[in-house]
Image: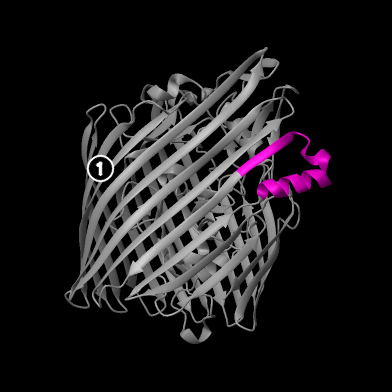
Amino acid sequence: MVKVSLRLLSFLPLFLSGLAIAQETTWTDSLRAAIKTDTRSIMRTINKLESSADVLRGVISPMGEGDPIRWSQGMPGVSTGADGSSAMYIHGGNVGNNLYSLDGVPVYGYSHILGLTTTVPSAVIESISLSKGGFEGQYGNFTAAHLNILTRDPAIDRVHAEGTVNNFLAGASAEAPLGHGMSVIASARISPIGLEYRAFRYLLPTRLATFQNLLTGVGDIYGKFHWAIDDRSSLSASTLLSLDQYSFTTVEGSRDALGWNNEIAILQYRRNFDQTEMDAQVYVNRYESMQQQEMNYHGVDNTLSLNSSMFEAALSSNFSSRRNSAWKLNYGFMARYARFAMGPTGTHAGKGVMLLSFNVQATRDIPEKLHMQAAIRGNYFWNMADGMMNLRPDVSLSFKWNLTKSLALEGSADYVHQYYHTLEGLPLGWSTDVIVPSGNTAPPEFALQGNLGLSLTLGRHSASLGGYYKRMGNLVYYKYAQTLFTDAFIGWEYSVDIGFGNSYGGEFLYEYQSRNLYVRTAYTLSKTDREGFATVCDGGRFHARFDRRHILNILGRWKGFSLAITLQSGHWENGAPLVYDIRIPDIETEAEYYDGVNNFHMPTVFRLDVGYECKFRIKRTEHTVNLGVCNLTNHFNPFMLYYDAQAEGWKMLALLPIMPNFSWRVAF
């Protein structure tokens, strides 16, 4: 409960005027060019969706404009977890089973401003894609889905700059040529939420009486240097630095703090050899998380903390060859070394691991008839601390068969493994932000899944209907997450429970698009469970965290106006039926949070969002303004239970009252 309560307390100052998100996404599938609008350039299959940065910005969100996470959360098969967070539970997987990558490099600290947005600014994004099956061979070490963000190369023929401001961020970016084929792009953003908090607390002191002295440090920096050496080769170097830090004092006298940071540096070389293209890359990646609480407990000053960190360095090279229009061959390798550390201080020696991967992928195309792809990836994993060595394959297959000009049959199958675990804790499915490697007591996670469906396109109408089944194994649950602030985390591998999971369901998508009107209805019917955890429900089967039976998203866009409706079934609260100690200054009590399997069903989530996007030009500047209201009906969307030790009772918490949003982007 310490972890959960600490996180919830840290959330409240941020949501001063409420929080809401709009699950809005738009895409097209085989639409004639004459009826495509300027901003609708998304391509899709049942397993993969792709979009440009322009479409992301039109998504209604508390930031005033969308981002990759908000875009992804509107897709079929995606459960958003707590309404308003950046979590994604896809086809039954946990949050840590997804891969978030920037130009192919994992981003472990992708959440920004406590889940309001992502750390990658839209000004540098070229395109994004979300894959839920039929995975590409060059990407691995995940079992649920891959959100792939690709950045653009800076222009070599012009100078360009733009500034942005919205509810929670202010930033600027610029790009310029340097001559001789070289160019550079840079972006920086900073959040003024600390100033906003103080202003809001001055105007409405009673609303924020629980929190005092809020201090924040939130921002990100992105930079990229690109050199077009000649017509066949290029070299680029890029970096992403992100920081989130929050601390505040409660009326009980405790000082709480949490934060995380991610630093990434990438060097990439590309070369075109007639019929073969090479992409070589080296990167270093450092991620840290921190949680701390200072309190006077029974007259004694205590400082409780949990720190974790990981460092990763990798070298990869991938080749793509096309001998003719029908066949394409991709192959390559990746070698990475990683070191992990966790505990109250984080100063003990890290644990090193090696992960070597080799992949081959073949693609067969028969124009307007058939597309097939098969990939195999060999993984060799070595944990140097406990001597565990593991050799396992990943296999992915996918196809799209055009039965007629309007009707296509699509499907995929995957058998994949994951070697890094994000420890899930109390309640089962909540992340502790601690990433650990596989070992003798925590074997690699695996998933076996299949997808099959039909897609139909008739003029301006398109629809798809499909189903999936997924079996997950070696899921890791940290048994003592309710006592985070102890030395137990140093020996985490002796405190984990291993189990399995199942997920199956159906996904439906209907779209209509004309020149000025776009309508989309996405519906997911699914069921996800867990079983085999010896310390949870005696190994019996129970609902997975954020298992939502029904997820419905309806979107309408007419010219610049948008309306989005989100309806999600409430999830079940469940976990280990134990008595937990509740410790607050001057109070020590006990509470039986779980009195059985699926002991409480959370209410249904409902949200209505509206927005308007306006673009205009003043002399040499282009302006884009987004205005909107999230959760227009002010619907109470509770997402979890927590124990109030002073009131000695359980309460529901919701952080999503009505909230206006605004963003302004000006380009020079």
Residue 637 falls left or right of residue 44: right
Q: Foreground: 105 or 441? A: 105
- Residue 89 image point, x, y percent: 49, 47
- Per the image, is 195 magenta? yes
- Per the image, is 632 magenta? no
Identify residue for label 1.
Answer: 355
**Residue placed farthest to the bottom in the image?**
34
**Residue placed farthest to the front in the image?**
179
Going 38% across and 38% down the picture, which residue do you hit?
A: 310
Q: How many marks?
A: 1
Amino acid type of the residue that numbered disc 1 sits on in the rendered structure: Leu
Quarter of the image holding residue 521?
A: bottom right
Say above or below: 337 vs 386.
Answer: below
Q: Foreground: 28 or 109? A: 109
Would you call the spot at circle 1 few (<14 residues within 10 Å), some (14-19), or many (20 or more)?
A: many
Q: By what rule are the colours in the image chosen? A: one colour
Q: Quadrant of the N terminus?
A: top right
Q: Quadrant of the C terminus?
A: bottom right
**Does the magenta stretch mainly form a helix, a strand or a loop?**
helix
Say above or below: 305 vs 319.
Answer: above
Asked whether residue 34 appears in the rendered view, the answer is yes
The part of the chain drawn in magenta is: 193-216
Q: Foreground: 508 or 76? A: 76
Q: Foreground: 148 or 514? A: 148
Residue 373 falls left or right of residue 275: right
- Residue 560 image point, x, y percent: 66, 75
- Residue 103 image point, x, y percent: 37, 59
- Disc 1 element: strand
Asked whether residue 135 appears in the rendered view, the answer is no
- Residue 338 image point, x, y percent: 31, 40
